[in-house]
Image (spheres, rainbow, N blue to C red):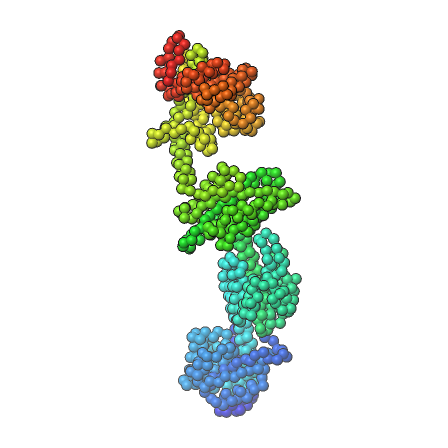
Amino acid sequence: MSTQVQIQMATQAGASANARVTHQSNSVVQNVEESNVEESFPFSEEILPTDTDEPPKHRWRILIADDDEEVHSATAFALRAVKIDGSALELLHAHSAQEAQSILQTQADIAVIMLDVVMETPHAGLSLVKTIRQDLELRSMRIILRTGQPGYAPELEVIRNFDINDYRTKSELTHTRLITTLTAAIRAYSQLEQIEANNRGLSEVVRSSNNLFRLRSAREFARSALESLGKLLCVVPQGLVCVEQRNHQEIVDTDLHVLHGVGRFGVMVGSILEKAADVEIQRAVRRCVASKTIVFDGNAFTMWLGHGSHDVVIYFDVERPLQDIERRLLEVFATNLAVGFENVDLFERLDFFAFFDPLTRLPNRSRFLADVDQDLFSRQGGSRCLAIADIVRFSDINDALGHRCGDTLLIGVSKRLRAATGTGVSMARISGDSFGIFGPENAIDLAAIRRAFEAPFFVHGHALAVQVRLGVVRVADSKGSAVELLRNANLALNQARQSGGGASNFFTRSLSEDVQNRVALLHSLRAAIDFRRGLAVHYQPQVDARTGRLIGVEALLRWRNDYGEMISPDRFIPLAERTGMINELGLWAMEVALDRLATWHGQGHRDLRMSINISPVQFRAEDFVDKVRHIVKLCDASLRHITFEITESVGLEDHDLLASHLTALHAMGIKFAIDDFGTGFSSLSQLTRLPADILKIDRAFVSTITDGPGDRAVAATVVMLAQSRQLGVVAEGVETAEQMQILLELGCDQMQGYYFGHPMSPDQFDAWLLERPKGSGELPIS
């Protein structure tokens, strides 16, 4: 039957048939729309295709699959000038199901297929429907099934069993019906494509956002953002990202700098936008910054990603008009990009404060050690060294002028150090006023560094003469990591501090050995105190040299380590004072000595007094007086027979606390002897502040007392001073009869030293007491 006859027959079919087909077509389209709209964006209704008078932007592609050539010709004739929603039709032709499948596999954007049921086989069209939906996965394409032999495929069964969108007999497709059916199908296809575009775009937004949120670098974020925009819009990216320059605390440059660019904008990276970009781009960016949102302008758009007063702008040239759905997706993506860039900015700030010094902008200790370790691992050969430079008496400047001046000075020092070192040298601020320097040995010139500090610093109206001291370690002289290098450089710096001024010192093996010995000694002392292992209190007699009468003893700490070696008090007492262990050690020695004093008093030596050395560190403890009361009560000792020996340096301690402790102890009946008098600071002025009962002439003056009249002048002065203030006086370190005789002539009667007796253990002292002559007045010589 010819196509003309089919059209005439269809025209005469009557209104009832038309109504039935129209109702069926609309029902299928309505079902498709209702089944898919629920999955679209909320604004999907706004993007449905509408009639327009604008020039067609594209063509609707229609595939005619029929084995009857007249059907192809008639359909092409009927649709030759038809436009649907402002777009013309492009017809593709296939004369078999196999040919149609080939076209579908190679051609894209086919909106509708008008498919004959019976072609090379009675059910070729129905088989192709399954292939289209299941194998080719063409879900949006509309399928209009046409048949001239309804008996081969009953309508109800086909609609129920096959995913088609309309089913017509060829006699039903009049010219009008053909156009209305295609219009409904194309509109359904357009909406499904828009929904699919929504879904694809949203998926790309989610995927890109997830990837961008993992980034920690602003430059890397900018690169990925431009790439993601290209993928979202299915274009080769052409754009740039520009930002304000910041120092992680404040904006330092309000000009926008191109952080990253792609395509033709790649050459602008690192440039100021106003110098690199044309006027139109500059205007677009300014409009975007002013509105702080996304601005669409023809084929391009500008996106603001800043936060607060920090401006970040993306300019992207799409090079084609943007569809409505693309604009909507860009608005969603812009929000995610803004949050992502704010996160990156936060991470960069956290990273900066974790690894850099905000004041000097230099790396901090952690970053410095990591960089040095990386250099040690990667570099082979070459002489390198690490130095620590600190500012001499920086705390005095800080205290006198304030932290604001101190901060300004630190910035100035960092700049001079940088200027004084050669290329390839890394620097860091590793502590308050200390700077780490690492690099080739010939690039760290100590003389050049010293010269850099010859000129004064002018800080807030003050001219400050500043010196730096340096501790240096050569990599070749120190094995291990950056931490080991820094430790050894610090040892050398400590040596430089002892030299005073702007000295410098190099690390040597002996320095490390000394430190290791001190650490080992410290650990052993800690164990000795904890377990009372090797510690003992020895006693040296104090006598009246004129009568030979024993008047007292001095308690002296002794320590034998785990190896059986006697450790000199000159070594372990200062160590205990520096570490604070002297508090615990001194209280233990006091308890042992007073317990022994109570024993001797019980044995009949009731006039014997006990002298105990008290460290200045002990006086700093607020509860020291309470501890003394407790020990005296525990040992049942006589307070009037206790003498605390203190040095003149106690007078340099906190005066209020010192006065409180000394007054309280003196009121209890405890006497005070100033040990090593004349060797400390401002002896006479300190004497007026300390509640002294006894002055002790230091052994240094006693040892030279026999050398001549001039050498005995100091001892004579101390005796005269004591007598004038009605104080007792004791000479220590007396080793010969000649020294004893001269001291007696000077008026000093009370003495102690090897001439009378060495420091002895309790048992040895008891034996010494038994050996003393009774009533003769003679003195035993030890």
Q: Residue at x 59, y 82 (%)?
A: 83
Quadrant in which the C terminus appears? top left
Toward the left, the furthest residue is 563
From this view, report whether residue 286 is shown above or below residue 4: above
> In the image, residue 654 lies at what x, y percent?
56, 29
Q: Residue at x 53, y 87 (%)?
A: 76
Q: Residue at x 48, y 74 (%)?
A: 139
> In the image, residue 773 lies at what x, y percent?
37, 10
Judge whether residue 703 can be spotted in this image.
yes
From this view, report whether residue 148 is shown above or below residue 757: below
Toward the top, the furthest residue is 775
What count of labels does the image hold?
0
Q: Nearer the viewer, residue 18 or 200?
A: 200
Q: Nearer the viewer, residue 779 or 645?
A: 779
> In the image, residue 734 lies at what x, y percent?
43, 19
Drawn side of residue 293 relative to residue 541, left or right: right
> In the image, residue 653 lies at what x, y percent?
54, 29
From this view, report whether residue 383 is shown above or below residue 396: below
Q: Residue at x 50, y 38 (%)?
A: 499
Judge whether residue 17 can be spotted in this image.
no
Q: Nearer the viewer, residue 601 or 745?
A: 745
